[in-house]
Image (tube, rainbow, N blue to C red):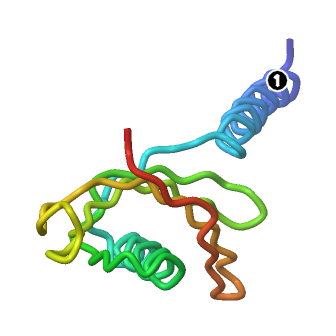
């Protein structure tokens, strides 16, 4: 084999592995490594606030405990958020965990709460 053939083969292998890793990531869930990132915190606060507007449950955001992202037509965030249920609710102010899914279209700076339920 000549140098040109070897180069083309190596380049093909590199490009194929990049394509394969991107194909796995697109549509699959990837862990969020920094749940204290200001953007992740903003999404967690948005999820609790939006749910509270709809339910009038009196929930107060505490923190994002963990989360994952999913590349779609935009980005899905699946977050486990700790919330304070307040003294007016049977929990007497204790923190509870909820799973929130927020869809974000970054270019439009648009977010939508698609799911909010008690975490298992």
Label 1: which secondary element: helix
Tell whether 39 sits left or right of 61: right
- Identify the image quadrant of residue 22: top right
Residue ID at (64%, 75%): 112
Q: Classify 68 as above or below 87.
A: above
Residue ID at (47%, 54%): 117
Q: How many neighbours does mark 1 have within 10 angstroms: few (below 14), some (14-19), or many (20 or more)?
A: few
- Identify the image quadrant of residue 114: bottom right
Of all residues shown, which one is farthest toward the top? Answer: 1
Tell whether 11 sits left or right of 60: right
Return the residue nearer the eye: 10 or 42. Answer: 42
Q: Classify 94 as above or below 15.
A: below
Q: Position of residue 88 (x, y in %)?
A: 20, 77
Q: Classify 47 as above or below 117.
A: below
Say which residue label 1 marks. Answer: 9
Q: Position of residue 104 (x, y in %)?
A: 63, 73
Instruction: Please count the marks in the image.
Output: 1
Return the residue nearer the eye: 56 or 37. Answer: 56
Work out which quarter of the rendered image holds the N terminus and state it. Answer: top right
Work out which quarter of the rendered image holds the C terminus and state it. Answer: top left
Q: Position of residue 58 (x, y in %)?
A: 32, 80
Return the residue nearer the eye: 1 or 87. Answer: 87
Return the residue nearer the eye: 67 or 51. Answer: 51
Tell whether 105 sits left or right of 41: right
Residue ID at (75%, 38%): 23
Q: Position of residue 98 (x, y in %)?
A: 37, 55
């Amino acid at each position: 084999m000549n140098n040109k053939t070897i180069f083309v083969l190596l380049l093909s292998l590199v490009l194929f592995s990049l394509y394969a890793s991107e194909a796995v990531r697109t549509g699959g869930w990837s862990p969020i490594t920094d749940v204290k990132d200001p953007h992740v915190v903003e999404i967690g606060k948005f999820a609790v606030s939006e749910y509270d507007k709809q339910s009038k449950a009196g929930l107060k955001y505490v923190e994002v405990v963990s989360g994952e992202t999913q590349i779609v037509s935009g980005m899905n965030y699946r977050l486990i958020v700790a919330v304070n249920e307040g003294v007016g609710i049977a929990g007497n102010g204790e923190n509870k965990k909820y799973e929130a899914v927020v869809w974000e279209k970054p270019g439009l700076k648009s977010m939508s709460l698609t799911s909010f339920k008690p975490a298992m």
